[in-house]
Structure formats: C-alpha cells, structure tokens
Image (cartoon, rainbow, N blue to C red):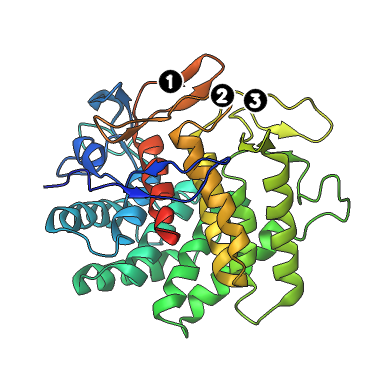
Amino acid sequence: MVGRPATTTGGPVSGRRPVVPAPSFAHLARLSDDTGLFEHARRAIVRREHGYCTDDVARALVVTTREPEPSDALLRLAECYLAFLTHAQDARGAFHNRLGYDRRWADEAGLGDWWGRALWGLGTAVARSPAAWIREEALVAFSAGAARRSPYPHAMAFAGLGAREVLRRHPTHAAAAALLADAAATIGAPSADPRWPWPTPRLTYASAALAEVVIAASQLRHDGPLLDGGLRMLAWLRDVQLHDGRLSVVPAGGWERGAVRLRHDQQPIEVAAFADACATAATVTGDPAWNAGVRQAVGWFLGDNDVGMPMWDPATGGGYDGLTPHGPNLNQGAESTLALISTLQHARRWS
C-alpha cells in the first residue's frame, strides 16, 4: 500500500512552526498504471486521454528512488517508471517524450528537456535505489544517454544533475564526469553585473536547476570559482524571489531583464527546483543557512505564499497545479504532485 505517512514537525517558516507532512505517494500511485504515470488530472481524477510523458516519469523515478526506506509498493512504482524510461530510449541514447494512452509514441526520440530529466531519474536510481536490479539497469540506460549532448541549457542541467548522482556511487564514471562538466560549461559563468548576475537575460522555468548543476560541478575538481559563481547565481535568485519574507517564485511566463515582473501564475516546479538547489548548496558548502530556502519552499506549499493558501490537498496527497491571483488551480497533475513530494523530502533535513 502506498499511503500518507505520519507527519513531522518542521522548522520555522516566516516566524511560525508549521506541522510539515511527510511525503505522501498516494496520489502518485493514483496517477500511475502498469505502463507509467499519467500527465494530467481534473482535480484528483486522472485524465487518460492526455497519456504519459517521459518528463514526468523521470521526475517520478527521482522521488521514488531517493526515499530512504521504500515500501514494496514504492519499489514497484520505481520499477515501472524505470521500465518506461528504458522503453522510451532509442538505440543512440535519445528519448521519446510523449506516449498516448494507446501505447503509441507521438514523437520522435530527441534530446530536449525530457532527455535531461530521463538521465536525472536514471542517475538517481543508480545512486540511491536499494534494489540492485534497478541500479544495474538504470546504469546501462544512463551510460547510453550520457554519450549524447543537448544544445539546450535546461536539458544539460537536468542531465548534469543525473551525472552528479551517478558519481555518488561510481566516482570514476568518466562519462558522468564529462557530462557534468559539459553541463556547467553550457550554462556558462554568471554576469558581472550584480543587478542581474544570471548568465542569460531571461529567467524561464526551473531556473534554480541551472545554479544547482554549476554548484555540483564545482566538486569535480574542487573548483572555487565555479562554486562561487553557482552560489552567486542561487543567492541572487533567492533574493529576487522573496516577497515580504516569503517565497514568491518567477511565474510561468518568465521574467526578462528590465521588464516588469509579474507574480502569477506561479508553478510548483519552480519551488521544487529552488528547494533542490538550496539543499545541494547546504550539502556542498556545509552552510546550514541554505536550509532556510528549503523551509521557504516547504512553506510555499503549506500556505506561506502570495495568497496565503495551501498548494496541496491533504485528502489526496496531490499538489495543486499552479498559484493564480485568486488561489490555487485545484487540478492535481503529475508535475505539481511530484514537486510537492520532492520538496517535502527535503524537510527531513531538520526533522
């Protein structure tokens, strides 16, 4: 059974001490079948007509394999997601992204974000799954995909995060080390302008993942300048996303330098990426001050956000799809539910 575990008490968020729920996989199981993970839901009910996507299945493999003591049901989910990814991969290491409910691929295999996220999921399985058969098969698929390169910085960032995971268990894995170094190089160095130190003139989505992979790549050769650059990117992103002491992430429409920044619609993926990056910064630097960013991300889901409303449904364990000026979008799709689970997993840092 994949249910909602007991709750734990977390650290302060904006001066309060909320009760932080432990990650629930109940809604993730509701969205899954023996093929993979459905992408969309209307409220909590799955919408099969939209089918599956590699992007979400890969994220699901990340959260299920980084659970420290997975149940048998959770192991079965992880194995299902791994089987989906190996089916999505072609002979040259690229991946299909969209599979219809009729089990037919709707696209050609490619090297977009889904390729990067697939490698992130596979790398996490290699590093963290307690099941040897999952680790071994994931390593085969990761190694095939790691030989490729994407022209897209976000795809390379996600792939680099997978490479960082592989290096946890296999420190001499040359392909993983090369991929991580190339990911950081693709993202580039931060700008010298303190008003906008980001490497590009626009923030789009999952921005913190770019800073995170630069921070992670600094560990390859104890590169001080690389670490400093990644931390400067993340610190600036943290500062511009704080509003009255609470997290207010860049919305789905992005934010371009010099333009007015809108506050809606905010997406859970942005919050989860920020939590991941802050957790990595705390681990790499040993500075617990970065855990404040994780607390702010957890607080965003619990209601410490711009409209003061929770972004999840305790009855289902699902995450809401977006924060609008009028409150949450109550649909509970895969991406938002995975963002919730991922963020709550980090709350164990202070529990």
Q: Residue furthest right?
A: 193
- Of mark 1 and mark 2, the one earlier in the sequence is 2
User: Residue drawn 44% across and 35% down?
Assistant: 302
Image check: 7 left or right of 309?
left
Q: Residue furthest top?
A: 326
Residue holding disc 2: 265
Compare residues 347 and 187 and report the one nearer the observer: 347
Image check: 222 left or right of 300?
right
Residue holding disc 3: 263
Q: Look at the image and tell me whether residue 145 can be seen.
A: yes
Residue type (three-letter) at the residue carrying disc 2: Asp
How far is disc 1 from disc 2 in space, using C-alphas? 9 Å
- Per the image, label 2 sits on a secondary structure element best described as loop
- Of mark 3 and mark 1, the one earlier in the sequence is 3
Image check: 232 left or right of 218?
right
Q: Which quadrant holds residue 79?
A: bottom left
Q: Around disc 3, counting alpha carbons within 10 Å, would you say few (fewer than 14), some (14 to 19), or many (20 or more)?
A: some
Residue type (three-letter) at the residue carrying disc 3: Arg
Q: Quadrant of the C terminus?
A: bottom left
Check the image and report above or below for 253 versus 172. Answer: above
Confirm or deny contact between disc 1 and disc 2 (CB under 8 A). Answer: yes
Residue 166 % position (x, y)? 42, 72
Q: Look at the image and tell me whether residue 152 can be seen.
A: no
Residue 312 % position (x, y)? 37, 31
Residue holding disc 1: 329
Q: Residue furthest bottom?
A: 172
Image check: 344 left or right of 152?
left
- Per the image, label 3 sits on a secondary structure element best described as loop
How far is disc 3 from disc 1 in space, using C-alphas? 15 Å
Instruction: State the count of labels.
Output: 3
Check the image and report above or below for 58 versus 93. Answer: above
